[in-house]
Amino acid sequence: MTWRGVVVASATLLALLTPTAASAAPRQGQWLGLAAGHVGDYRWIVEAKRPDGPAGAGRQGARRPCLLVGTTWQTSPFSFLRSRNRQCVGAAGLSATDPPLVANGMQPSTGSRAELTVVGMIFPTAARRIRVTLGDGARRTIHLDRLSPLQARTAGLQPFRYAAFATHGEWCAERLVSENAGGRVLWDSGTDEYSCGSEGPPRFAAP
């Protein structure tokens, strides 16, 4: 998967790393909640699971998590606009020096300026934090949460680390750098292949 950026503009996180409790029985095809919340008329959720079908079978399937970001905008008492973005790790799995698996979603999802952006990221267990450089040059550090053994068994996945959060408006990260517990750089997106300019929102390419 090639890093090309991640959309988003305000740096105020509304929710960060809020794991959801999981049931005990592992089942392929069951989504595991990583984080969720609501802001006014907007609701969001970040979930993970094994791939469907043959890709999710056996030990290899446990190394290939899928990530889903869902957003909902309630435009009236009985009207909802929903968006979903699903990404899955490739057949080789996710190693310490690979790019993270990333999915993002915005509301409104088309047309007007985004009022809410939601981001989910999955990293290998060696990663402990990410250094983020935003489009305006500001820098942030996000400490990664770890999938618990119970959650891993429930979803039938190998443990991983993740970030899941929502922010007001658009938030554009021009660079991501993952580090291990000792501060050694594991992966660096660089800044040459994408920007937060006016040519449209930069995104991660699908794996």
Image: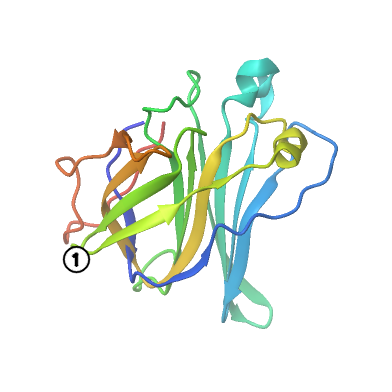
Q: Position of residue 147 (x, y in %)?
A: 63, 42
Q: Which residue is at 45% across, 43% downward?
A: 128
Relative to 20, 100 lies left or right: left
Residue appearing at x 77%, y 48% in the figure: 22
Direction from residue 2 to residue 107 in the image, left or right: right
User: Which image quadrant for residue 186?
Assistant: top left
Question: x, y percentage for residue 170?
Answer: 34, 67
Q: In the rendered image, is residue 109 in sight?
A: yes
Does 98 sit above or below residue 36? above
**The one of 51 and 80 positioned closer to us in this rendering:** 51
Say which quadrant the N terminus sits in.
Answer: top left
Q: Position of residue 139 (x, y in %)?
A: 26, 60
Q: Nearer the viewer, residue 127 or 181?
A: 181
- Element assignment for label 1: loop
Q: Amino acid at mark 1?
A: Asp
Asked whether 108 or 123 is in front, the reply is 123
Mark 1 lies on residue: 136
The single residue placed furthest to the front in the displayed view is: 182
* 191 displayed left or right of 3: left
Question: Residue at position x 32%, y 60% from top?
Answer: 140
